[in-house]
Structure formats: structure tokens, C-alpha cells
Amino acid sequence: MDRYIDFDKINLELPPPEEEPDRQYYFTAKAKRYAEAESARLGRPLTCCIQTFGCQMNSRDSEKLLGILKQIGYQETDDEHADFVLYNTCTVRENANKRVYGRLGYLNTIKKKNPDMIIALCGCMMQEAQVVEKIRTSYRFVDIIFGTHNIFKLAELLCRRYELRQSSGTEACGAIPASLSQPTKSGTGTAASSKNNMVIDVWEGTDRIVEDLPVERKYPFKSGVNIMFGCNNFCSYCIVPYVRGRERSRRPEDIIAEIRRLVSEGVVEVMLLGQNVNSYGKTLDTRVTFAQLLKQVDQIEGLERIRFMTSHPKDLSDELIETMASAKKVCHHLHLPVQSGSSRILKQMNRRYTKEQYLELVDKIRRAIPDISLTTDIIVGFPGETEEDFQETLDVVERVRFDSAFTFIYSKRTGTPAAKMENQVPDDVVKDRFDRLLKRVQEISAEVCGRDLHTVQKVLAEEPDDHLDGYLTGRMDNNTVVHFPGEPSLIGKIVDVYLEESKGFYYMGKRGN
Ligand code: SAH
Ligand code: SF4
Ligand code: F3S
């Protein structure tokens, strides 16, 4: 955050401002007073615990949510016996939802012993009307529900919860506050508060991007940076466009300013985040391409590494390939989800490229950037997938030889076109294909990842090794993990490491050359 805000000086006698982010600064100040009173009553600081499910978008959102909670006065803990517990949920596959419901049962047992605890749910799952309905009726101990479009409103929603509690006691019914039954400006869609004091504020969509909110980063030396939100691609299996809304790009000057600030705070590596970074800039008044943005980021002094996620093959331009090849700081790693090797299935998936186009693209990238590391996502068991289709997928895996691949069993998502398709593939057939694919992907990965053995590589030391005392874990430019002996003081620094031994997915190394 650019501006220093003295929350104790904000006059709460005045009505809240209309404009963001000032409105949220006001509610942060208000929530801070409520939290201070609660903390005085308990005779200890209040604690908060955020559990994040899903992808890097959610991880980044959680850092913003923690930033708000810390300003209110909460201390972070990993323990779910906290005063405020927030689940930032994912719904990309059914398993993600199941995990949340399972964990909620456990939270209920904790809350029975501590009824003052506040439980909040946010993230992609909350954008689904049937999920909110289920929680509203069957998980009545939940206090706050909000979605992906209004995470910036956490302080306001928390104030509302405190106020409902004060006015009606923990279990009593309260009226729906007028300010919550209407979404604030430029939010569209539903917002409501249920009978049992549950504060619910979910927007169907938004065209706004609120800048200048606090962020509490997980790592001091690397950070995700949102460059765009939402997705317009509507791959037929995917729920993301429905729960994250339409594509919106942040202005390049806001992105650059944020990265400069991060660098001044000690960040050496950024990960530019978007569901499809290759279509960055299309919603801006003045068109800027993703490659142009990368060139600007590459100029930032003090920054050492630039990564980005995710690239849709259909939008990957020659300009981007040239930029990746010539830029000084852009890592030679590309995550390029193929999803399937069958052109017939790709068409059904609405991916808008064929197997041949994907393979040509890979060739072109490798010609321009010979040391590129390629990773991918693959779905097995899309409706109507035959053994021949699956063989095409295996063929792509054999030809491209990915450094690694995330393999997923197709999961039917309500509301997506694929959910209505006939010929859903039986579970046992899918499982058998999945096992065969995974085996091949892992074998190839073990061969490919070892290619830098006995060379010296630049490694960003990231954390103490989980298993070996006196060792650190770091990442090479191409994202491969390396374990090597080193002092914790090296964490956050890029050091030369000699790769002594390849272990398939990672290396054992030693410092120096
Ligand atoms: N925007 C990114 C991916 C976001 S979701 C992209 O287009 O590459 C991450 C991955 O989850 C996808 O690449 C896809 O492989 C997988 N996925 C999405 N929906 C799925 C579903 N219904 N079943 C199984 N896997 C799915
Ligand atoms: Fe989902 Fe496709 Fe958008 Fe990725 S590009 S988020 S897979 S719809
Ligand atoms: Fe999951 Fe939402 Fe990411 S559905 S994968 S957390 S965008």
C-alpha cells in the first residue's frame, strides 16, 4: 500500500465514504475498535487463521485478506482454534468442494467450545448459488460469506457481523441491514443476509479493480502480482469464468508501481498472475500487449526474475516468444496447458487450437528459446474421450517431453456445457487412463529434469529444507527444485549451485562452481 493510514485518526462519527479504497479504510478503523474491545474483554490479542484452497490467484487474494485482518489487529496463526477463521475456497474440481465441507464439520466442533469465534468463507466456491444455499441452510454456524469480486470489503463485512452480534446476541435473529441487501456501486448481482445473522455478500460480477489495499506477503523475497482478473475463454469443462467473472486488466502503471514497491521491500522475483496472461491488455483504454508489459517489467532495477502464469496456447504471440528470448529477467519456463492431445476433444473443450497447432507452437518456442522448460495441464476422461483420443494425448506427451505435467481426472462442474454432454466416461476407464498417463509423464519428467546435471545454476534460496538439517531448498530459473547445504541467511538470495545429483524431479547440489 502506498499511503500510510493512521486508522486511529479516522472520524467514525461521520458516515462512511462512498469511494474505494477510502470506504474500506473507514471500516478497517471501525473493525479495529471492535477488535480492540474484544481483545480487552478476553485479555489477549485476537488471532486469525486463513486456509487457502486452489490456485495462485487464491493465494494472492489470501495475502490481501491477511493484510486487512492484520490492520484490524488480528495476529496470524496456523491453528484453526482462532478467533477468526477464513476458508478461501476453490471449486475447479469436485474434490476441492468436498474438502471444504469436510473441514467445516471440524470447525463446527471447535466453535461449539468457543461460540465467539467468527467463521468466514470466501473464494470461488461461494460464487455458486447452490453452495451458498447449502451453507445457509445446513452450516448455520458460518458467520460471513463473500465472493471473489469483493474481497476488498472484508473489513466492512466484519463490522457488520460485530454489529449484528451486539444488537441481537450470538444466536438471535437480526434484521437485514440495508447497506448489505444492496451491492455497492459497480458490483452486480446478489447480496443478502440470512436469518441467523449470517452476513452474505456475493456479487455475480464486477468491472472494478480496487487498488491500494494492504497486502501481507507470505515470502519477503518473492511475490505474486495480479495483472488481470477473470477469464473470457469458457473452455467447456471449466467453471472459472463463471466464478471469476469477465476478463479485466490492471493498468500497466499500477502494475509497475506495485512491482517497484515490492522491489524496494526486498522482492527479487515476481510471478505475474492471470488466467490467460496472453490476452492481457484487451480491456484497457490504451491497448498494451502482454509482451509490452513484460518488457516494462524487465526494466525494473533490482528485480531479478520474472515468471508468469498461465498462458493459453491460442493467444501465445510471436512477440511474446521474442520477448521471452531477449528479455534479461524473464525465466525460461512456460506453463502451456494442452488439456488433451486429440483435436476432436480439443474442439469439444472449446480450446480453439488443434494438436498440430500446439505441436507447431512448441517447436517454434524451442527454436527461439532452446533451454525453455515446458510444463502443462492435462485432463483425462473428458466426455466422449475414446481410447484413440487418449492415445493422441499420450502421443503429445511423448513428442513434447514436458518437464512436468499436472494431470487431472475430468470433474463435472454444474453449469458448464460439458456437464450436459452425453457419453460421460465410466470411472474405471478414466482411472486406468489416468494411471497410464501419470506413469509416462513421471518417467519422461525424470529423464528431462536431469538435463542440467553437473552444471552450475543460479538458484533462488527459498526456505530451510524440510528434511535435511543445514540444507536449503531453492529454485532454478526453469523452476526445478534444488536442495543444497547453506545458511538460513542466504534465503532470498540468488546463489550459484553445482548440481551434483539428479533425483528425477529435483537435484541435490552444493554451493559454488
Ligand atoms: N487458466 C488456466 C487454468 C486454470 S484451472 C488455463 O487455462 O490454463 C487449472 C487447470 O485445472 C486447468 O488447466 C485444467 O487442466 C484443470 N481443470 C479445469 N477444470 C477442470 C475440470 N472440470 N475437471 C478437471 N480438471 C479441470
Ligand atoms: Fe478455465 Fe479455460 Fe479460462 Fe483456463 S482459459 S480458466 S481452463 S476457461
Ligand atoms: Fe480454484 Fe478459483 Fe483458482 S476455482 S483453481 S481457486 S480461480
Image (spheres, rainbow, N blue to C red):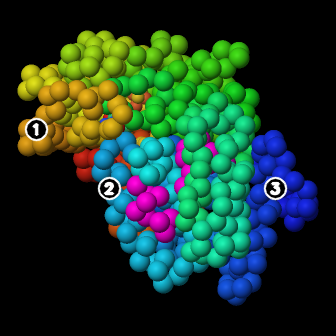
Q: Is mark 3 within 8 Å of ligand 3?
A: no
- Asked whether, in this view, residue 353 is left or right of residue 51, the answer is left
Q: CA distance from mark 1 to mark 3?
A: 54 Å
Where is 318 relative to 406, above or below? Answer: above
Where is 203 relative to 294, above or below? Answer: below
Q: If the picture is divided into quarters, which one holds ligand 2?
A: top left
Residue at numbered disc 1: 426
Q: Kindly indicate the quadrant of the structure image that contains residue 429.
A: top left
Q: CA distance from mark 2 to mark 3?
A: 37 Å
Mark 1 burial class by Cα count in 10 Å: few <14, some 14-19, many 20+: few
List x then y, in percent, for residue 253: 74, 29
Q: How many marks?
A: 3
Residue at numbered disc 2: 98
Is residue 147 located in the magenta-colored stretch of the structure?
yes
Residue at numbered disc 3: 26
Identify the mark at residue 134; answer none if there is no mark: none
